[in-house]
Amino acid sequence: MHIEQIYTGCLAQGAYYIESRGEAVVIDPLREIQPYIDRAARRGATIKYVFETHFHADFVSGHLDLAKATGATIVYGPGAKPSFDAHVATDNQVIPLGDISFRVLHTPGHTMESTCYLLRDSNGKDYALFSGDTLFIGDVGRPDLAQKVVPGLTPELLAGHLYDSLRHKIIPLADDIIVYPAHGAGSACGKNMSKDTQDTLGHQKATNYALRPGLGKEQFVSEVLDGLVAPPAYFPMNVLMNIRGYDNIAEVIHRAKQALSADAFEAAANETNAVIIDTRDAETFAAAFVPNSINIGIDGNFAPWAGTLLPDIAQPILLITEPGREEEVVTRLARVGYDHTIGFLEGGFASWKNAGKETDRIVSVTAAELSARMKDASNITVLDIRKKSEFDSEHLESAINIPLDFINDNMASVPKAGEVYVHCAGGYRSTIFISILRARGYQNLVNVRGGIKAIKETGGFTLSEYRPPLTAL
């Protein structure tokens, strides 16, 4: 028996390759399937199944392309209704693979078709649980996503199902079973996930708030729903792509790899109303960029931020990347369903500059400079664009919180008059924030280099934390 966890940090996503006696299964594959095919070929194995734990919301799975390329059977849990050929398993069905097997555990709650796969070794002993988005390390799947696709499924109803699934299907399993979840810290599919990507079930029973003994259903529902913020807008569209199907990723890459000269790039931007995404690092972008372009650095959490900030997955996209990274960027956009890249600037930003085209820049200050300006003026406006949970933990006393996640909803709250100083944790998100607003006419935003980290290191600032109001005794 051979088990590999294939973890992708950008999406905080775990896919799995399991093999026994020359037969293999891939669980929750990413859209680019060649690494799985190559892995099986190196090991002389045949991919027999593609297991899907549910219809994913945060990424487009590679189930269709992998099945077509290998002849593997796609397997879903009970209740799934895909628009393509697949085996919809029954609860407790046993699926053999070489000299091991998987028992299908239907665990509705995150979604109604959510399913875990319990691996039994060659001796028939329960060995590992591939828990999808039902059970994470330190958390459980959020029960408010399926309502965006299936009317009538309220978060409370789904949370109740999740409670029953955990109590009746997961907790009774042996403590020494290894839990392999579909996501880790950084994913929007949960709220309190650990950085660990696997654990024993026994340790989770002892430490995971959602599995603690004596927890009643009503209290569970309250706790699992507490603190959830709205999911990214692209989630429902990814679910539908995973249910209905999608273009082969090779076709998506072929369409996107259109090298455009500076003149052709400018013409395409004007004629198509495409959004221009510049994937260079934040400081390089801030120094000089194509006017109206948006910075989302490829070396950060690129795909989730693209999905969060671009409300329409059918939006035409033009790319500015470091030369040689074009296909990487297109692939990472396609992972979250953005299949309509129409070209890239040949030679990167340097070719635009060399052509004598107009450029723009973002003004930046150091934390020390911000401190000096705040001492000289009492009406300085500071925007902290980190998540609310980060802001509540610690923030500048005078700062206003407008999270980047919800910039499209809260744009009108950003002052257009007077200098506005913008910071995040380290500079990645603040540059994104400013670039989006600059493309919409805001000329008064100043970036604070180094974010809250630099502010704390500099000193001279008053920091506060959120304190909930006292309740009457």
Image: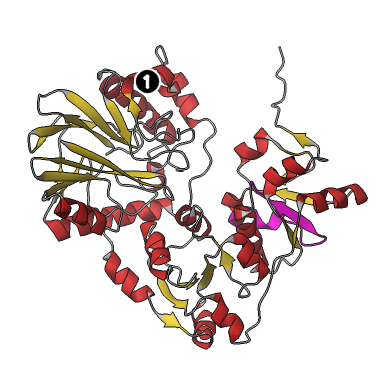
Residue at x 45% of width, y 34% of height: 193
In the shown orientation, is residue 320 left or right of residue 75? right
The quadrant the N terminus occupies is top left
Q: What span is colored magenta in the figure? A: 408-425
Q: Is residue 200 above or below residue 38?
A: above
The quadrant the C terminus occupies is top right
Q: At label 1, which amino acid type do we have?
A: His
Res 60 quadrant in image: bottom left
The answer to whether residue 151 shows anywhere in this view is: no
- The image's colour scheme reads secondary structure
Residue at x 42% of width, y 70% of height: 326
Residue at x 51% of width, y 54% of height: 300
Q: Please tell me which residue lies in front, 150 or 166.
A: 166
Q: Check disc 1: other Cα within 10 Å, few if <14, some if 14-19, many if 20+.
A: some
Q: Please tell me which residue lies in front, 137 or 239.
A: 137
The answer to whether residue 69 shows anywhere in this view is: yes
Q: Position of residue 209 (x, y in %)?
A: 45, 22
Q: Position of residue 259 (x, y in %)?
A: 42, 81
Q: Position of residue 106 (x, y in %)?
A: 23, 32
Q: Is residue 168 above or below residue 11?
A: above
Q: Is residue 405 above or below residue 116?
A: below
Instruction: Find disc 1 in the rendering and name its residue.
Output: 203
Magenta stretch contains residue 422: yes
In the shown orientation, is residue 284 left or right of residue 248? right
Secondary element at tag 1: helix
Res 136 quadrant in image: top left
Magenta stretch contains residue 87: no
Farthest residue, direction front: 42
Res 397 quadrant in image: top right
